[in-house]
Image (tube, rainbow, N blue to C red):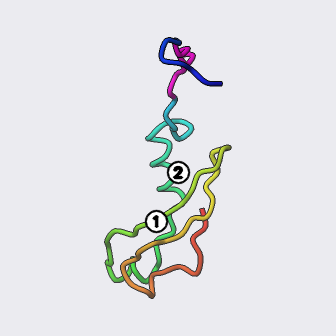
Amino acid sequence: MAFSQNDTIPPFPPFEEVKPEYPGGEMALYQFISANLDYPDNASRKGIQGTVYTQFFIDEEGNVIEPTIVRALTLNLMPRRCGL
């Protein structure tokens, strides 16, 4: 379909933008993370704390796919695999 300068381009139909949200909201997300966090025993005993960077994708159904740890504190705290 081609338009000339005199043609009026039809507007897009209105749509509502829906931002992604964890089922149950942000507090439910924090509760899920807290219940499923696997803190290494040796790190806990030694008082090791810090930030671990992760990467993952969310598919169309909302499932976490390909979770990986991008950066951990030390190599010996790096799990063999990152499973959520």
Q: Which residue is mark 2?
A: 32
Above or below, 40 relative to 75: above
Is residue 51 found left or right of 59 in the rendered image? left
Which quadrant would the C terminus be assigned to in this image?
bottom right
For numbered disc 2, what is the local secondary structure? helix
The amino acid beneath tag 2 is Phe
Residue occupying image coordinates x 59% and y 51%:
58
Is residue 20 found inside the magenta-colored segment of the image? no
Q: Which residue is mark 1?
A: 54
Q: Main secondary structure of the magenta part?
A: loop
Between 10 and 20, which is closer to the camera in this rendering? 10
- Which residues are drawn in magenta? 8-17
Residue occupying image coordinates x 57% and y 65%:
67
Q: Nearer the viewer, mark 2 or mark 1?
A: 1
Is residue 9 found inside the magenta-colored segment of the image? yes
Above or below, 16 relative to 60: above
